Amino acid sequence: MMEEIKSQAEQVIRELLEAAKLNRGDLLVIGCSSSEMIGSRIGKNSSLDAAQAAFSGIYPVLQEQGIRLAVQCCEHLNRALIVEEETAEQFGYEMVNVRPQPKAGGSFATTAWEAFAHPVAVEHVKAKAGLDIGGTLIGMHLKEVAVPVRLSRSTIGQANILCARTRPKFIGGERAVYVEEYK
């Protein structure tokens, strides 16, 4: 099952990156319920194995493409995010003092903390794209305007996924002319 989760996660992240058209240095947010991936209700059966499998399918792809990652913690840590210290500094995010654990922050955030070179927690980000695995509600961490992205898969493991990219707001009304690449 864990190899399947890893493979599915890699497929999903590759498709999302293609659809979102992110550039090196852009920020992507991921919220992940390891419980949902293994068929339990969110927050009820945290699985480090499932989290590590998904992370191992996702993170190397992001690293190879130069995409920065923010991993959302669960509601027990007020949906704080784990990022590399360099990412927090680059985007001007204020660091907070907390370290995720499997049952307070979540297994995926714990996995990110352990995998990152210099992990820190921040309270808010504004990412250009996002992946929600298992109904973790990442919308608050996306730039305006979020646009749903449909992929060839709708699940990782047994968890439903929702993906989004963002675009600039359209302003100006009926006489305005818009840049086609942002639609």
Image (cartoon, grey):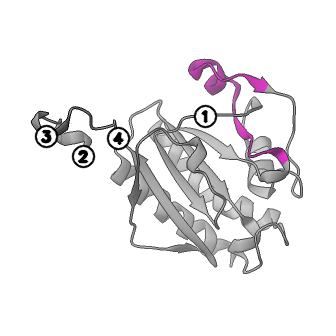
Q: What separation in Å lies between label 3 and label 4 (alpha carbons)?
A: 19 Å
Q: What separation in Å lies between label 3 and label 1 (alpha carbons)?
A: 32 Å
- What's the residue type where badge 4 is placed? Arg
Residue position for label 1 = 125
For residue 83: magenta?
yes
Residue position for label 3 = 174
In the picture shown, does residue 175 fall above or below 156?
above
Whether residues under marks 3 and 4 lie with C-beta atoms below 8 angstroms apart, the answer is no
- What's the residue type where badge 2 is placed? Lys
Residue position for label 2 = 183
Whether residues under marks 2 and 1 lie with C-beta atoms below 8 angstroms apart, the answer is no
Mark before the other along the chain sequence, 3 or 2: 3
Whether residues under marks 3 and 1 lie with C-beta atoms below 8 angstroms apart, the answer is no
Whether residues under marks 2 and 4 lie with C-beta atoms below 8 angstroms apart, the answer is yes
In the image: residue 43, left or right of residue 86: right
- What's the residue type where badge 1 is placed? Val
Mark before the other along the chain sequence, 3 or 4: 4
| Residue 24 locus on image (x, y percent) | 43, 32
Range of the magenta residues? 77-95
| Residue at 14%, 33% in the rendered image | 176
